[in-house]
Amino acid sequence: MALLAAVYAAVLAVLLRAGVPVEVVVTGGAAILLAQWWWTEAAARRAIGARVVDRSQEPELHAVLDRLCALSGLPRPRLAVSPTLSPNAYTIGRGPRSVTIIVTEGLRRRLSPDELTAVLAHEIAHIRHRDVAVMTLASSFTIFLQAFGRHARQAIRRVPVLLFLLFPALLMLTIYLMVIGALAGVASFVAHVPLRALNRARELAADRAAAELLGQPALLASALLKLHDAKGIPLTDLRAGAYALGVVACRTGSGLMATHPHVNERVRRLLEGHPR
């Protein structure tokens, strides 16, 4: 968090040194934060076509959530189901009383009932630790920088070359946008390093809490091994537009840029920390 704050502070310092008024920087930052805070859940559900289901539609899943929430002392979150065959479970929202767990159809088909319970315990742990709120707040500016750099490049490509010849001022504006867009892209890349390190730490903490909640770490370890084989890795990354905490990493890189710890590390920690 300290490294991430340092990156954000550096970006804001550059804006202020460039002559951007303090009021604009503060107002813009607050607007970005509020938009991400209120929009992320709807965006994440839309990204994978998830729909909220009640107890009559999914009695078994609701029964599992009721049991886990009773064990952890948390209010029951909303439950949504996605028809995608990519196996994963996501936690999205703002806090314990405003959060949704998304379960994909692929996850339900791939895991046994007990393994599915372990995965949902992992998601409950994210809620208990307020990880969704923390990661949403931490990622807001990074997602904005990434989106700004991408849209700036797209806008520049759409400008006809003839307009540059007719309007020299447009050329100067385009060069300015290129520089700002490039800086935003670099800042986003740098910010993703501590952001994803924070994400990996929260995933390990959720693994441990899920194992402690159920007292059966082998169930979550078994689920992780099933979900991380060649056919189990999901391809949809909700982080392009909204932040969601999924039990399985998408194909987003390795090492410093990995969103999740390696499955071998997660399984080793689960089984070594709980010999049963």
Image: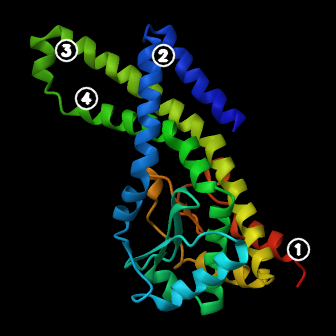
Q: Mark 3 vs mark 2: which is more N-terminal?
A: 2
Q: In the figure, residue 2 lies in which quadrant?
A: top right
Q: Nearer the viewer, residue 78 or 125?
A: 78
Side of 204 relative to 36 (left or right): right
Picture residue at 82% right of the left edge, 69% below the top: 269
Residue 15 shows which numbered tag? 2
The kind of residue on which mark 1 rests is: Glu
- Residue at the spot of label 1: 272
Residue 156 shows which numbered tag? 4
Give SS at disc 2. Answer: helix
Residue 241 visible in rendering? no
The kind of residue on which mark 4 rests is: Ile
Q: Mark 3 vs mark 4: which is more N-terminal?
A: 4
Spatial CA span between label 2 and label 4:
21 Å
Q: Mark 3 vs mark 1: which is more N-terminal?
A: 3
- Residue at the spot of label 3: 170
In this view, the mark in front (3 or 1): 1
Q: Given contact means CB atoms under 8 Å apart, are the residues at marks 3 and 2 in contact?
A: no
Q: Given contact means CB atoms under 8 Å apart, are the residues at marks 3 and 1 in contact?
A: no
Residue 187 versus residue 169 in the image, above or below: below
The kind of residue on which mark 2 rests is: Leu
Spatial CA span between label 3 and label 1:
62 Å
Give SS at disc 1. Answer: helix
Picture residue at 71% right of the left edge, 65% below the top: 206
